[in-house]
Amino acid sequence: MIRYRNTVAVRAARALRAARSTPAPVTRALIVSCCLVFALGPASGLNPAHGTGDALLAAQQAYFRRWGVVPAELFTGSARAALTPATALFVHGSWVHLLGNMLFLHVFGAMTEERMGRAQFTLFYAGCGYLALLGYAAAHADSGQTLVGASGAISAVLGAFLYLFPEARVTSVLPFLFFLPLRLPAWVVLPFWAALQWLAAGRAAQGPGVAYLAHVVGFGLGFLYAWARFGREGRGRGPGGPVVGDGRAARACPADRVAGE
């Protein structure tokens, strides 16, 4: 037992030092890629090539339909449609949508990447993100709404983080506590977040809004993958109960967006 605890402590300490001292290249590359794709696309409003007013709105709708997931088209056998759960991971519907997702990826991605390794984390992120969007599309197979966003993959990162670092402390801001920042262990914060997504998914009506079901699917996939891949030997608490990432409060929720037309 003592040997096991020492092993976990050493691994957790290494992961924490790595998160603070290394650039977490995959996590950073994902953040930069999402930001560049958004800046160049019509949703940002920064690229004058997309026009303004009605022309910009039309460009946004066409852009989301081309690169986002349309559930009604996904299971038709089209090769292009089959690729959209991958391309949709890099497309976001608004500045708030983008920044909320990137904040969560920044906070939770580095330690998860270091624990898994760069290649494994890349495949994990892409695979779970694809399956999360696929799961949402299967549950709304008749929907013509477009689904975009990275939060299915980011939710998987949260699920894996919960399993790998359950006692690592996360700085959280809770609206019902007057936005008072609190440092709570991951095993408190992340299951609470997942429960909210589950409840919201049950109440969500079809139409423009947040694809909560994709969050639930992604979170579950991430947790199960970490459990199956690493087992008990892969778990760590984080020495001294560290603040995750750089200690910034996680004020936003990762969100896939169902874009209306």
Image (cartoon, rainbow, N blue to C red):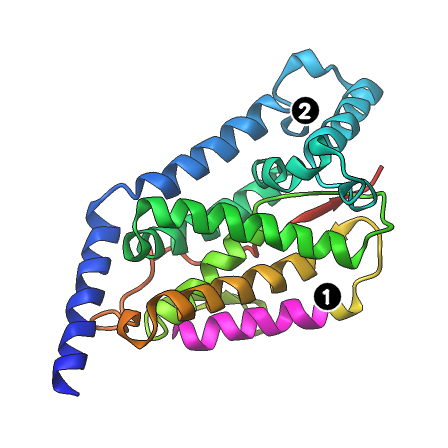
- Residue 77 on image: x %, y %: 77, 39
* Residue type, numbered disc 1: Ala
**In percent of the image, x 67 and y 70: which residue is there?**
198
- Residue 90 on image: x %, y %: 56, 36
Label 2 Cα neighbours within 10 Å, binned few <14 / some 14-19 / many ≥20: many
**In percent of the image, x 80 and y 26: which residue is there?**
57
Residue 255 lies, with reference to residue 213, above or below; the image says: above
Does residue 251 show up? no
Residue highlighted by disc 2:
42
Residue span colored magenta = 182-201
Q: Residue furthest front?
A: 77
Measure how far apart labels 2 and 1 are at the Cα level: 28 Å
In the picture provided, is 154 more to the left or to the right than 17? right
Foreground residue among 65 and 173: 65
In the picture provided, is 165 more to the left or to the right than 72? left
The answer to which image quadrant residue 122 occupies is top left
- Please identify the quadrant where the C terminus is shown: top right
